[in-house]
Image: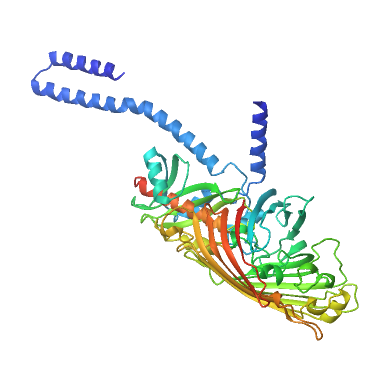
């Protein structure tokens, strides 16, 4: 096409020259023709290119629309809901739908003077469903130790319905995680450093602690809170080792006695929480004694520039301990503790950013915990000094990506009876 | 083949049914620039070298080859900012964000257009505000100057990574 235009122009030039009146006129006309050819050369490819560009632009807009999901329904927005900002609150008016998630842990324990063990400790599936803008269901189904024909078990850890009213006050009912401590509500393996959860989170705060109940929750400024009325612990399960065995876990729970549990957290700035919680309720159930169990704790969790520090202190008491001992046929040093408690502090620093910009994490950490399930026992009973424990744990948590973690640590287990046995652990964890 | 098509249809339907889109691109763009700003849509196709350079500079893996941005300029034609949109996975579900980069190469604004994960994982505005004024450097990281979201670290990571990726791409692309 271009060549044809050039030929025509050249012929025109030659022909024109034959009839030129003078050379100046010829040069002028030649210049004009050269300019026209240049314009045609410039214009001709543009005709094709423009069409190609138009098509690319159209395809680009289609692709962009698909990528940014502009083809999907846009939820309407008006006011803020549930403590989130203008943008964040809009999700509560989104379409209904189902959601899945989960986590799991595998644990190898090399135990001093005991048989080493390897265990598919947990495999968890979260499922949730949003019925409408106000009503949301959430649940966690847990498979422990892989096989129910051996020591494994299947458990619904939580399953509740939320009724969302305002940011400051919403209602929750069902099988609830007790809002006590740090780990009970956030117990995914990537949330704590060590291969095993702190023992305080087992002996003093009986993680994972779940009860049937109903309550309110919400956020007010930089504060968040939860307050529930739940089924209470049952005294028949309390031992010298603590209240762990007294959880009813939503399984045909006795409800003669009810309990109250509440929690307040303050978020002074992003990445930091300072809070406290308390539980109180009788545990006697069908017995004549009250057996009130009260547990209170304070906690802090701060993360900044690769540092993570957590600390918790808890103290509990059990009324009518002697009567519980009698009912449970506990004598001597097997007595339940009239008071129990402990504390832990743990810290880690992610050293990976010092050597790579990749998102992997290498976190050397240390945790020290001290607790006693029998700080005091009723008159006429004895303390078992083996329940007064101090555990030092240190090791490394390696996260190739934030959703997976490999942990290696060593635990120095010390108790007042000098019968503590050390161990080292390897754990593999994932969340999705 | 039919089975594959049916499966694809089911997946697309399921994805659409569960979608939590709460701001259109146009709504986001309306808030990205001051009133009266001239906004021009620009499309760029990355060369393999540009893609590799952006990945290296940002430390973020991505597969995008076509980059669209919305360049805003004032009445005098002076650039005042560039809006980019990015869709990525948070945990197992996607979110779409708009990152507005100022003419100084720093983050001016971040908006979440859609978020499919459970609402508890959604970053609050006060967390997002930490990104304002950030440039592409080591501090733009949850391990440095950006405080993580307690209990929702993957949500924070997703937005930080998107910001790093967009700032790296922005450096590579020509000014308007």
What residue lies at 49% left-to-right and 60% top-to-bottom?
B142
Position of residue A33 measured from the top left corner of the image (x, y, whole percent): 20, 23
Which of A89/A180 is in front?
A180
Query: Does the rendering let one see residue A168?
Result: no
Q: Is residue A232 left or right of residue B51?
A: right
The answer to whether residue A353 is above or below residue B42 is: below
Q: Is residue B166 visible?
A: yes
- The structure residue drawn at horizontal position 64% and vertical position 58%, both measured from the top left corner, is A109
In which image quadrant can residue A42 be found?
Answer: top left
Quadrant of the frame with the N terminus of chain A: top left
- Up-down relation of residue A316 to residue A249 (above or below): below
Q: Is residue B113 left or right of residue A290?
A: left
A83 lies left or right of B109: right
Residue B72: horizontal and vertical position, in percent?
40, 50
Is the image coloured rainbow, by chain, by secondary structure, or in one colour?
rainbow
Q: Residue A118: x and y, percent?
A: 66, 54
Residue A233, located in which quarter of the rendered image?
Answer: bottom right
């Amino acid at each position: 096409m271009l060549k044809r235009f050039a030929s025509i122009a050249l012929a025109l030039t030659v022909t024109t020259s034959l009839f030129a009146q003078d050379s100046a006129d010829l040069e002028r006309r030649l210049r004009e023709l050269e300019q026209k050819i240049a314009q045609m050369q410039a214009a001709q490819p543009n005709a094709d290119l423009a069409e190609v560009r138009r098509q690319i632009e159209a395809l680009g807009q289609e692709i962009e629309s698909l990528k940014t999901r502009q083809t999907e329904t846009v939820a309407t927005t008006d006011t803020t809901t549930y403590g989130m900002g203008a943008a964040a609150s809009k999700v509560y008016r989104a379409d209904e739908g189902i959601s899945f998630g989960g986590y799991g842990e595998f644990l190898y324990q090399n135990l001093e003077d005991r048989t080493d063990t390897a265990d598919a400790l947990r495999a968890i599936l979260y499922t949730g469903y949003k019925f409408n803008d106000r009503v949301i269901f959430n649940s966690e189904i847990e498979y422990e130790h892989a096989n129910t024909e051996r020591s494994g078990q299947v458990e619904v850890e939580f399953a509740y319905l939320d009724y969302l009213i305002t940011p400051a006050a919403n209602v929750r009912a069902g099988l609830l995680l007790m809002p006590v401590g740090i780990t009970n509500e956030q117990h995914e393996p990537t949330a704590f450093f060590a291969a095993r959860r702190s023992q305080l989170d087992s002996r003093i705060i009986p993680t994972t602690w779940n009860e049937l109940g109903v309550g309110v929750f919400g956020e007010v400024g930089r504060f968040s809170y939860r307050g529930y009325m739940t089924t209470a612990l049952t005294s028949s399960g309390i031992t010298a080792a603590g209240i762990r065995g007294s959880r009813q876990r939503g399984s045909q729970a006795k409800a003669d006695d009810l309990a109250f549990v509440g929690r307040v957290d303050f978020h002074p700035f992003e990445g930091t929480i300072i809070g406290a919680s308390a539980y109180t309720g009788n545990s006697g159930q069908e017995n004549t004694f009250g057996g009130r169990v009260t547990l209170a704790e304070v906690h802090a969790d701060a993360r900044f520039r690769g540092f993570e520090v957590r600390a918790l202190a808890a103290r509990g008491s059990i009324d009518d301990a002697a009567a519980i001992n009698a009912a449970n046929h506990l004598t001597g040093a097997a007595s339940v503790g009239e008071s129990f408690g402990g504390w832990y502090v743990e810290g880690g620093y992610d050293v990976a950013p010092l050597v790579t910009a990749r998102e992997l994490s290498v976190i050397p950490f240390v945790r020290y915990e001290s607790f006693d399930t029998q700080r005091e026992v009723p008159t006429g009973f004895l303390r078992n000094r083996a329940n007064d424990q101090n555990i030092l744990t240190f090791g490394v948590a390696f996260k190739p990506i934030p959703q997976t973690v490999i942990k290696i640590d060593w635990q120095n287990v010390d108790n007042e009876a000098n019968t503590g046995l050390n161990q080292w652990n390897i754990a593999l964890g994932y969340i999705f | 083949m039919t089975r594959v098509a049916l499966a694809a249809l089911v997946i697309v339907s399921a994805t659409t049914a569960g979608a939590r889109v709460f701001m259109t691109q146009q709504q986001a763009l309306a808030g990205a620039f001051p009133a009266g700003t001239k906004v021009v849509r620009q499309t760029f196709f990355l060369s393999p070298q540009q893609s590799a350079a952006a990945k290296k500079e940002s430390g973020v893996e991505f597969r995008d080859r076509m980059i669209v941005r919305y360049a805003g300029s004032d009445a005098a034609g002076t650039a005042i900012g560039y809006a980019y949109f990015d869709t990525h996975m948070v945990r197992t579900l996607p979110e779409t964000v708009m990152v507005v980069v100022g003419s100084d190469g720093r983050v001016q604004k971040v908006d979440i257009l859609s978020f499919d994960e459970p609402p508890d994982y959604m970053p609050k505005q006060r967390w997002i505000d930490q990104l304002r004024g950030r440039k592409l450097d080591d501090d733009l990281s949850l391990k440095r100057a950006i405080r993580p979201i307690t209990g929702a670290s993957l949500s924070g990571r997703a937005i930080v990574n998107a910001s790093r990726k967009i700032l790296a791409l922005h450096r590579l692309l020509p000014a308007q």
